[in-house]
Image (cartoon, grey):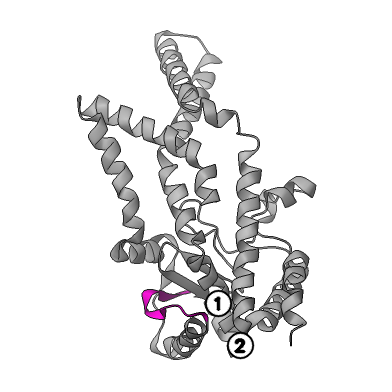
Amino acid sequence: MVQLLLQLPSFLASLVIVVVLAQLLFPGMGWVGGLLWLVSGAMAFHRPTERALARHLLNLRHPTPRELSRLEPLWRAVTARTGVEGRAYELWIEDSDHLNALAAAGHIVGVTRFSLEQLSDGQLAAVLAHELGHHVRGHAWSSLLGQWYAVPGRLAWAVVRKLIRLVTVIGHGRMGFWAAVLFLVAGTAVLLVALEYWFVTLTLAAAPYLLAAVTRRAEVRADHHAAAAGFGPMLAEVLHMMQAADRESGPVTASALSGCGRTAAMGTRTPARGRAQGILGRLLSTHPDYHTRLHHLAPYLKQR
């Protein structure tokens, strides 16, 4: 819920944009467009939509019979131990050579092919328990809704940036009639977005850091969910494996989906070119470092 609250300014700005566009296209029907857009969030929990999201945006596939024969017993054991109805969720596979897993939308749990092939039964169960923790605690659906409702605002800002760049390029030459028109349109668009985003700009510098902190906290809580169910030692083994892999090859991650809930993943890897450095990089990281996660798991390991 905190994650949704942090994205409330972006949501409200997006709502204004949708209503204004609907009003321009269909005079007198702006409120209908806004209402339809609000209702569209429910599609995140529509099973066919979730499957399309998993297949086309997250690049997941259904498990083969052989893969399912290994996953299903582990999944049943995990959900039985945590008191969750396992049939409410769907298991998917990502064809990736990285050790990772994810919880997406309302009912999607995915693991990479590498995880399925390389992890022991106990380790794979711990990973599944971690992803189930994201679902049980609402991390997956809140992330998806927050990102979905921010899309109109992000698209509007992207259009404004392109208009500004276009006007700048034209302005380097002769400022003719069309350049002046474009400048006027871009200026109006900038003013409109600025007015709608005035409350966003007040927290623009802090919002990414706050969202990253909330996401890191969600990872720790998902770890706790798995550890409380008795999977702490196995989860620690997986984290040690991921730490060793990162030391050997450097953090290279499963492609993070910017708008569809992949934030609730076992581990996030950032391409080297876009990796932030130093303390700012750590503050913007969506996952705690391995030392922090293992530290929080330590009490569960001492209970062995």
267 is higher (above) or lower (below) than 186: below
Q: Tell me the amino acid under the disc marked 1.
A: Ala
Viewer-side residue, 113 vs 36: 36
The magenta stretch spans residue 67: no
Instruction: Give coordinates of residue 138: x percent, y percent.
Output: 48, 61
131 is higher (above) or lower (below) than 9: below
Disc number placed over residue 94 in the picture, else none: none
Residue 270 seen in the figure: no
Left or right, residue 23 beside residue 217: left
Marks 1,2: beta carbons within 8 A: no
Disc number placed over residue 129 in the picture, else none: 1
Q: Count residues near mark 2 (Cα–Cα under 10 Å), then give few for <14, some for 14-19, many for 20+.
A: some
Residue 215 placement: quadrant = bottom right
Q: Count residues near mark 1 (Cα–Cα under 10 Å), then give few for <14, some for 14-19, many for 20+.
A: many
Viewer-side residue, 141 vs 161: 141
Viewer-side residue, 304 vs 151: 304
Name the element at disc 1.
Answer: helix
Residue interval drawn in magenta:
82-94
Residue holding disc 2 = 122
Residue 109 seen in the figure: yes
